[in-house]
Amino acid sequence: NLVLLSDYLFDPTALLVSGMQEILADQEMIGKISAAGQLMQCSASLDVLFLLDGSYSIGKGSFERSKQFAGKLCDALDIRLDRVRVGMIQFSSTPHLEFPLDSYLTKQEVKERIKRIVFRGGSTETARALKYILRKGFPGGRNSSVPEVLIIISDGKSQGGTAMPAMQVKEKHVTVFTVGIKFPRWEELHVLASEPTDQHVLFAGDTDDAANGLYSTLAGSVCSATPPGCKVESHPCERRTLETVKELAGNYVCWKGSKQPNTVQASLCPFYRWKRVLIKHPSRCFRTVCPEPCDSHPCQNGGTCIPEGLVKYHCLCPVGYGGDIHCAPKLSLECGVDLLFLMDSSAGVTLEGFLRYKAFIKRFLQAVIGQDSPMNVGVAQYDNSVRIPIEVGQYRDAFSFMKSIDALNFSGGGTLTGRALRYVAQHGFRSTPVFADVQDDLPRVVVLLTDSRSQDPVAEAAKYARDRGLFLIGVGSSFVRAELAQITGNPKQTIVYSDPQDLFNGIPELQRKICSVDSPEGCQAQSLDLAFVVDASAGVGLENFMQLKDFVRSSRLHFSINRDVTQIALVVYGSKPHTVFALDTHTSNSALLQAIHHVPFLEDSASAGRALLHVYSDVMTVQRGARPGVSKVVVVLTNGGGMEDAAAPAQQLRDNGILVFVVVIGDAQRDMLLRVAGSPNYLVHVSSFEDLHYYQDLIIERICEEAKSPVNLCKPNPCMNHGVCILGPGGYRCECHGWEGPHCERRILRGDSPRSAILPPHSHVQRNSGVLQDFSRAPWHTRRH
């Protein structure tokens, strides 16, 4: 086929981009061919000689590409003394041996030597180069005792006949590959190549494709190059080249001389111009195709396979299906609960929202509960009235449960969430024990799904449900965030989304919240010095103060109380602070319980600032049991009164590495409380004292997170009597003035000399019967864990 290209429209760059050889296949197949070319390896006893065209018709730029191509082919050769040997000849006007086959016996050496080859230039004397090989053989080769492969990289524009020497080379059982470069003349390359030429003529523009074609051919005779699972396939392909041809443009008037003197004669003369001609050669290309990592569809449950290179992949899994690399269900309740979904089917959520809730419940059960697992799950729906179409524990298999969910119908109507909460508290859990002598006392969890605000009061109904032992979890849009927090009694028990499509992303979080019932974690293995500072003023009142005491009492269960893990101090304050017990006073939970029981109510005005100064100077100190290298947290429990003077002392605590949490109950000035807490992350606002215990998990979780932060061994200063703490490798030392001892605790008497000691971070000083004593605990480095 011939295609004429106008001389002013011709753009060789565009042709280079499309390539001078094109396999007529879809992009997926071309990608597989290219990938297989990178995988294939030839490890056999083989002599490979490159014949590199270095003539002016190639040019220096294309010559460099020829070198890169040769180096790329070497990547797939097992080059060593007893396997593949490689040599190279550059030819132009005359052949020049760049290096024989026995010069370099490692792949890296060969590639480095190819890079150093210099372009020589000259005419394209391919025949002379072939005659050189006929005369000299493969320089440094093994004398035909192993298969010989000749790879000619050229544009095929030889200035002499090549048919005869090419035939003589092939008669010596040399396998000849020709690789086109630049705009090759394919006819000559076909003459030079071994039969069948479709398998021995390649194009250097796509190195991976050419490498694939070379080794696909060698695999059938010499190399075991085809990786397992791969196969050689035939594809239609098209090879192209450009030729410059002379074309008659027309006849023009010209003047010619005549035999008569001083006479010229008008005539018509032909006018020619040169044209670029794109010549197409339909052919067949034989390539090895290997299965891609994702061809076997390894990702389950709707996961998307993402290839990573040639053999690896990873699965992009839907929410809840990341249990392994193939998107197996990753979630499991791993906890025994009776679970009831309370689904809003009022007009406020619309039919679309109702269908989304049904799909959410189905996806949750598919991800969390196996097909054959017994289920204590039910579904209730509400609008003006409440119905429980699927009782808790009614279905024992997932298939029947899913069919029942599909059968649920949207009803519309009003949104009476309060009534629904009371109804499920009374009638939602009536499961019959499996055995008559076994009581069904599993925790009862209600998951409320709603996007619309209730048209009846929810606070009393929610409290009624919680008081009957129901664990409430709210799932809904940001529009009902405040109402969900009011219903659950704890913002930590809500899952809020801004975009309805994000609902399904909350499945893992919902699983964690369901299983968090009755399973406090706390900081059982985290070293921590913790001080509770409790408002005992008249503004709080005795009844509310008792609830603050209950909060401290129940919080202790989240910590392992002993000298090496968690120490707790308690300070109550009115106008003056009072230390109920110091950090090192009690070393067990039972001892703490007895001490908390006797906490006094002070019944006067409140000064939180004075209480925080007291904590800084008389609680979080080495002489009062504080441990260097251990995280330190102060939790202030208050109704917000008497906080005017607390900002500066709180900042002083933070400057010395002591974190301040402020838990305020009731209405208070947020700006002032933020100055005390230092950040919204350390300020927790609770609507009422009755709801305080619902926030306990949230507060404990934040304390535990902070306990994992790095600490400074010199903050707060462990040195007493104005000693200076100096950090050293693995510890610190106290620089004392007029005092001595590890923490500057002993006054220097006359005749004594001052001393300072390097302390490991586990050094500790305790006051016992008025005497300071040094003692060491289990070794640790920069902090306790």
Image (spheres, rainbow, N blue to C red):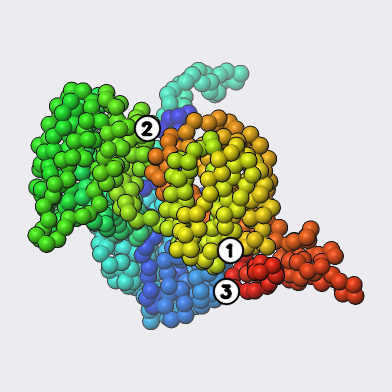
Q: Residue at coordinates 90% horizontally, 75% vertically from top-left?
A: 751
Above or below, 419 relative to 166: above
Q: Are marks 3 and 1 in contact (CB under 8 Å)?
A: no
Of marks 3 and 1, which one's residue comes earlier in the chain?
1
Say which label, 1 or 2, has the lower sequence index: 2
- State the quadrant of the N terminus: top left
Residue depicted at 48% across the width and 63% down the height: 591
Q: Where in the figure is residue 749, as x and y percent of width and height?
A: 86, 71
Q: Residues within 10 Å of mark 1 (few under 14, many from 20)?
A: many
Question: Secondary structure beneath disc 2?
Answer: helix
Q: Amino acid at mark 1?
A: Asp
Disc 2 marks which residue? 481
Choose top left, top right, bottom left or bottom right for residue 230: bottom left
Q: Pointer 3: residues within 10 angstroms few (<14), some, or many (20+)?
A: few
Q: Nearer the viewer, mark 3 or mark 1?
A: 1
Name the residue type under label 2: Arg
- Name the kind of residue labelled 3 in the image: Ala
Up-down relation of residue 173 to residue 197 (above or below): below
Asked where in the image residue 249 lies, by quadrant, the reply is top left
* Residue 150 as seen in the image, left or right of residue 645: left
Nearer-the-camera pick, 343 or 609: 609
Residue under the point 35% across and 68% down: 175
368 or 540: which is nearer to us?
Answer: 540
For the residues labelled 3 and 2, say whether their Cβ atoms are less than 8 Å apart: no
User: Could you tell which of marks 3 and 2 lies nearer the N-terminus?
Assistant: 2
Mark 1 = which residue?
A: 584
- Residue 663: image x %, image y %? 51, 41
In three-dimensional space, the C-alpha distance between marks 3 and 2, rounded to whole angstroms, equals 47 Å
> Which is more foreground, mark 1 or mark 2?
1
Helix, strand or loop at label 1? It is loop
Can you give x and y, in whole percent of width and height, for residue 721 in the image? 78, 60
* Tag shown at residue 778: 3
